[in-house]
Amino acid sequence: MPDIDDNKIREEVMNLHTAIYEKTGYEMKYIRPPKGEYSERTLNICNKLGYTTVMWSLAYDDWDENKQGREDYGKQKILDNIHPGAVILLHGTSKDNSNILDYCIKEIKNMGYEFKSLDEFEK
């Protein structure tokens, strides 16, 4: 996002908002900058559009289509790095994530953690 102009950012964010609303009925209020790339300018634009920018605290290279078929690796990365308040970034394009998500959720709960929406996080 830092490499595109203000109007293009507004256009892309609002197009995303519309698409998500039309498909799910959900009104977006949070945004994650693609690739985690942002600047004060892009944060300010998104804030003025009414969004809260949220970054992740736990991720791994699940986005790389050439690195699929590593389910044990994904499980280990997630479970070894879970921590209080973790915001886990998992890409929906990862087949590994689809295959390990149920297992990881159960294991994280067994570790004593609970899952909450961003609205429920203590600020």
Image (cartoon, helix red, strand yellow):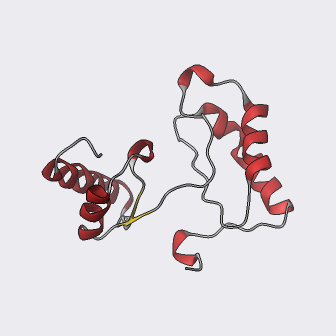
Residue occupying image coordinates x 62% and y 23%: 67
* Depicted 95 relative to depicted 26: above or below: above
Q: Going by the image, does 34 lie left or right of 73?
A: left
Furthest-front residue in this view: 40
Q: Position of residue 14 (x, y in %)?
A: 23, 56
Name the image quarter holding the C terminus.
bottom right
Residue occupying image coordinates x 65% and y 61%: 86
Q: Position of residue 17 (x, y in %)?
A: 29, 57
Nearer to us in this view, 113 or 6: 6
Residue occupying image coordinates x 61% and y 53%: 88
Q: How many marks?
A: 0
Nearer to us in this view, 93 or 60: 60
Furthest-top residue in this view: 66
Furthest-bottom residue in this view: 122
Furthest-right residue in this view: 110
Q: Position of residue 121 (x, y in %)?
A: 58, 75
The quadrant holding residue 122 is bottom right
* Depicted 81 relative to depicted 97: above or below: below
Residue occupying image coordinates x 57% and y 49%: 89
Q: Going by the image, does 72 lie left or right of 85?
A: right
Q: Position of residue 26 (x, y in %)?
A: 38, 64
Q: Going by the image, does 58 lie left or right of 27?
A: right
The quadrant holding residue 94 is top right
